[in-house]
Image (cartoon, helix red, strand yellow):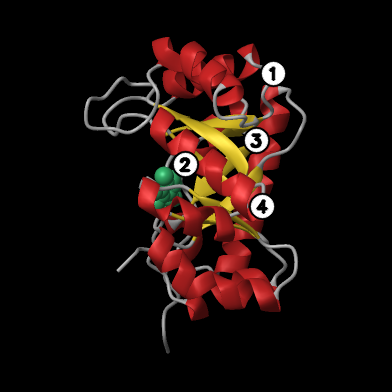
Amino acid sequence: MSKINPAPKNPSGSNPLLGPAQALECISAELTKACKVAGRGGGVTITAVSKKHKVETILPALEAGHRTFGENRVQEAMEKWPSLKDKYAGIKLHLIGPLQSNKAKEAVALFDVIETLDRPKLARVIGDEIQKQGRNPVLLVQINTGAEPQKAGILPEDVDRFMGQCQSEYGLTIAGMMCIPPIHEAPAPHFALLHKLANRYGLQTISMGMSADYKIAAKLGASHVRIGSAIFGARG
Ligand SMILES: *Cc1c(COP(=O)(O)O)cnc(C)c1O
């Protein structure tokens, strides 16, 4: 007789032994609850982060009807997503990793949301590609809320200037902001800061929170949480 052991839990409380579809359901219920506790409306979209996972691992989420996904590398996304986009209507693919200017053409062609607009040169190149391709990805500005020297993103004190530049020099419409808090700090102050900055510009799209802290992010006003391992398990 085999004994049934309780499955191990990851730090977020989600169970990696659940399939992606069940994990998405659990997380979605937790997000609804977190919003209710915080007294906020609006709902939270789960960006299922499928980086480093094979198509066969992603398929159950698509089959269950999930449509919002995140990848951090242009090259990897180009190998996996064009055929999936043909097969499943309504996919929203988010770029959540750093974008090199020389990959902007491919990124504008493939992604529906670019979350990592983080410097003037990239804003210019993306603006040029939008003109050329007639494609209009939703753009988020990445904010370096912890002012970490090694991390990408606009410093909080430079946000005003950059937002102005995007609009007046590069003709870009910015829809929202994203952040990745410092790894060894409590995330809540960073989420609160991002929410405050986005509010200052009337921006509705706020991408913050990952597997370990999505409930906190939801309470503090995230419109999108980027969740990888709690949905698809550990990355190889
Ligand atoms: C990988 C990644 C995530 C997802 O991380 P998990 O801890 O697996 O949920 C979220 N955001 C960004 C920018 C990432 O690169």
Amino acid type, callout 4: Arg
Q: Say how many tags the image has.
A: 4
**Residue drawn 42% across and 89% down?**
1
Residue 222's image quarter? top right
In the picture shown, does residue 137 fall above or below 168?
below
Between circles 2 and 3, the one closer to the viewer is 2
User: Between marks 3 and 1, how big is the CA–CA gap?
Assistant: 13 Å
Give the numbered dot on residue 135: 4
User: Between marks 4 and 2, how big is the CA–CA gap?
Assistant: 13 Å
Give whichever of 228, 204 is nearer the camera.
204
Give the numbered dot on residue 223: 3
Of the numbered discs 3 and 1, the one sitting upstream in the chain is 1
Residue 115 x %, y %? 51, 41
In the picture shown, does residue 62 fall above or below 163?
below
Residue 211 x %, y %? 45, 47
In the picture shown, does residue 188 fall above or below 229?
above
Amino acid type, callout 3: Ser
Viewed as shown, does residue 115 lie left or right of 151? right
Amino acid type, callout 2: Val
Q: Which residue is mark 1?
A: 202
Name the secondary structure under disc 4: loop
Give the numbered dot on residue 92: none
